[in-house]
Image (tube, rainbow, N blue to C red):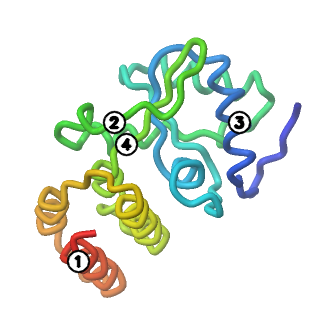
Amino acid sequence: MQYSMTGAELDRARILELLEQIADTLQGDWLLVGGALVSIWVESRRTTEDIDLIGLRGEVSERLALMDAVHTLGLPIETVNSAADYFVYRIDGWRHEIEVLQQFEHCTLYRPTPTLFVLLKMRRLSEQDLEDCRAVFAKVRDEQMHLDVERLRTALSELAPTEDTRLLVRRDALKELLIQGV
């Protein structure tokens, strides 16, 4: 089946379909992050432009296998993004902050814990990132999941200063969410 993805938003159903197709051709362990994860794990109405999928071994061969899988399915390479590995690998202890999302025949998809998820979002903290964090906080509350609030408060306080007033407002909103203790 061919897809035309140029500028298209991926909804939950399409993300699940594509993940299954991609996972059928991959091997090993993979971490799903970003908007696609939010759509299938937290907020089903969330759409995204691509699927952020990272090979856990951190090898170039994994990235190439992912691109080959996407190409074989007749999808534009831009359908997937593996560049998020740069941000994941910079977080101390990230390997202890992942959990199985779904098991396939030859590969396993992992997701970040709520703590790692927020750590990944807080550096950029776009308006969408803040909304994604709010949705994760709601999930944590509803499902009584663990969230390392102290680690997140510390990380937020250690972010580089900015003169971007809109970013400062979003950081303050995130700080307020953490003060409320989810």
* Quarter placement of the N terminus: top right
First in sequence: mark 1 vs mark 4: 4
- Give neighbour class at mark 1: few <14, some 14-19, many 20+ (Cα, 10 Å): few
Q: Secondary structure at mark 1?
A: loop
What's the CA distance linking mark 4 and mark 3? 20 Å
Residue 86 % position (x, y): 34, 40
Going by the numbered disc 4, the residue's amino acid type is Pro
Going by the numbered disc 2, the residue's amino acid type is Ile
Label 1 close to label 4 by CB (< 8 Å): no
Position of 97 relative to 117 (above/below): above
Q: Which residue is mark 2?
A: 98
Residue 99 % position (x, y): 37, 34
What's the CA distance linking mark 1 and mark 3? 37 Å
First in sequence: mark 4 vs mark 2: 2
Q: Which residue is mark 4?
A: 112
Q: Which residue is mark 3?
A: 18
Residue toward you, 80 or 103: 103
Label 1 close to label 2 by CB (< 8 Å): no
Label 4 close to label 3 by CB (< 8 Å): no
Going by the numbered disc 1, the residue's amino acid type is Gln
Q: Nearer the viewer, mark 1 or mark 2?
A: 1
Residue toward you, 110 or 4: 110
Label 4 close to label 2 by CB (< 8 Å): yes
What's the CA distance linking mark 4 and mark 2? 4 Å
In the image, what residue occupies the spot 28% across and 75% down? 177
Residue 164 % position (x, y): 31, 82
- Give neighbour class at mark 3: few <14, some 14-19, many 20+ (Cα, 10 Å): some
First in sequence: mark 3 vs mark 2: 3
Q: Nearer the viewer, mark 1 or mark 3?
A: 1
Based on the displayed image, in which of its 4 quarters is residue 154 positioned? Answer: bottom left
In the image, what residue occupies the spot 23% across and 33% down? 96
